């Protein structure tokens, strides 16, 4: 009968009995039902194991085995860290480490991966449980980003987060502005900004003194209560300029009249004023027109044009742009949105077309912060509708 039939405990007890009884091995073997040569072999093996050199060899073998196991563990940890470094680099470190554990748990096990990457195992399982909700949020953010890009493109790539949020809400999408700001920042969608420049106004010394009827109050309770006007320059390659004069209704910020010319004579501002009067159907008696102290606005021809239309003139202090802030703000928006980098137009025709296109966009589509992020024409139409309904 082979030795594999006997358990380790049985063999150890048989050897102990043979050693302690003093009787022949053959008799003890017969009593135990074991072949006597088998029992003798068991005794020899036990004696060999009891020798000091054998015990030392066994301890050394155990130590070597433990060291080999430790080396395997360290090599595995090194492999995990190398793989993780390629994935984690340049990303959200915590999230990407969780993703690494999810992708490699079959090869290394969750416990080992979390230990090596210094993660909480419970935290990983919590992250794994919320994966469907995160996937849904990611898909929603992607869809919203596409809409943000669309609104941004429709504005000529000029809108910032506030106007884009207003546009999305107008389309029925209730979205938080901070979320829009976050997605714009993540995807490098930026509105245009323009550095403020200061200019010196040259008054007409012969002009009649005109009072300031607005005193920086650029609000009105209805259309045709107060208008503001100003002039700006449009640079052309080669060092020449066109000049743009405007008339804006304070109530709705609507551009009522404008004129472009290659000069700054008084007819530039009178043409813009007459255009505004025509826009309002000539019913402008009593409206206040506010401007700076530019020589064109102080000229007798302009004063006569205002008198004929029944318009009351108003002027701010000399050299103070804040006294005509509504008109200044309009020009700042125009230059920011059609002159990125303050580049000059190649030709006068190109400048006229660019300005003409933007002015139409401004009145009918561009969302204005002062009037609840509506376009000026739409704001006037809504006000008329509400007045009729009341």
Image (cartoon, rainbow, N blue to C red):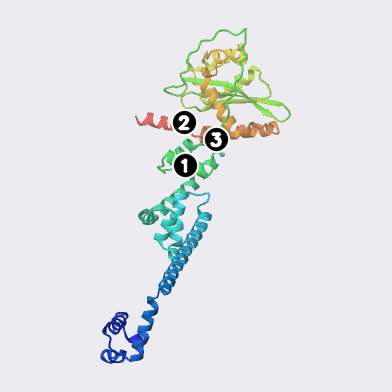
Give the residue at mark 3. 361
> In the displayed structure, does residue 390 sit left or right of residue 212?
left
Question: x, y (%) of residue 116?
Answer: 44, 56
Give the residue at mark 1. 182
Within 10 Å of disc 3 (Cα), the crowding (few <14, some 14-19, many 20+) is: some
Image: 8 above or below 250:
below
Question: x, y (%) of residue 207?
Answer: 60, 9
The residue located at (55%, 18%) in the rendering is 321
- Along the line of sight, which residue is nearer the eye, 303 or 71? 71
The residue located at (48%, 13%) in the rendering is 213
The residue located at (40%, 75%) in the rendering is 51
Within 10 Å of disc 2 (Cα), the crowding (few <14, some 14-19, many 20+) is: few
Image: 259 above or below 121:
above
Give the residue at mark 2. 369
- Along the line of sight, which residue is nearer the eye, 126 or 3? 3
The residue located at (51%, 36%) in the rendering is 160
Image: 3 above or below 218:
below
């Amino acid at each position: 009968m082979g030795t594999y039939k006997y358990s380790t405990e049985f063999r150890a007890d048989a050897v102990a009995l043979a050693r302690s009884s003093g009787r022949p091995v053959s008799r003890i073997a017969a009593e135990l039902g074991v072949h006597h040569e088998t029992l003798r072999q068991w005794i020899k093996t036990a004696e060999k194991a009891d020798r000091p050199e054998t015990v030392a060899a066994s301890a050394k073998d155990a130590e070597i085995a433990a060291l080999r196991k430790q080396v395997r563990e360290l090599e595995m940890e090194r492999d995990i860290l190398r793989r993780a470094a390629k994935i984690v680099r340049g990303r959200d470190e915590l999230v990407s480490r969780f993703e690494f554990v999810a992708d490699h748990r079959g090869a290394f096990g969750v416990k080992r991966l979390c230990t090596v990457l210094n993660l909480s195992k419970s935290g990983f399982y919590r992250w794994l449980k919320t994966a469907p909700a995160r996937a849904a949020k990611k898909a929603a953010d992607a869809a919203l980003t596409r809409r943000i890009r669309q609104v941004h493109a429709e504005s000529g790539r000029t809108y910032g987060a506030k106007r884009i949020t207003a546009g999305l809400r107008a389309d029925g999408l209730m979205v938080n502005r901070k979320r829009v700001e976050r997605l714009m920042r993540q995807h490098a969608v930026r509105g245009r900004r323009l550095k403020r420049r200061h200019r010196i106004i040259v008054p007409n010394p012969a002009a009649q003194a005109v009072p300031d009827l607005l005193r920086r109050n650029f609000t009105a309770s209805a259309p045709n209560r107060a208008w503001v006007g100003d002039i700006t320059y449009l640079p052309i390659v080669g060092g020449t300029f066109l000049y743009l004069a405007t008339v804006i209704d304070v109530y709705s910020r609507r551009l009522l009249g404008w004129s472009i010319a290659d000069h700054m004579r008084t007819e530039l501002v009178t043409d813009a004023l007459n255009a505004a009067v025509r826009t309002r159907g000539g019913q402008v008696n009593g409206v206040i027109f506010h401007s700076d102290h530019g020589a064109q606005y102080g000229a007798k021809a302009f004063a006569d044009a205002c008198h004929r239309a029944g318009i009351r003139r108003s002027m701010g202090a000399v050299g103070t742009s804040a006294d005509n802030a509504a008109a200044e703000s309009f020009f700042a928006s125009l230059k920011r949105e059609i002159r990125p980098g303050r580049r000059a137009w190649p030709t006068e025709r190109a400048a006229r077309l660019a300005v003409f296109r933007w002015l139409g966009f401004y009145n009918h589509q561009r969302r204005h912060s002062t009037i609840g992020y509506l376009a000026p024409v739409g704001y006037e139409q809504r006000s008329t509708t509400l007045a009729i309904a009341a």
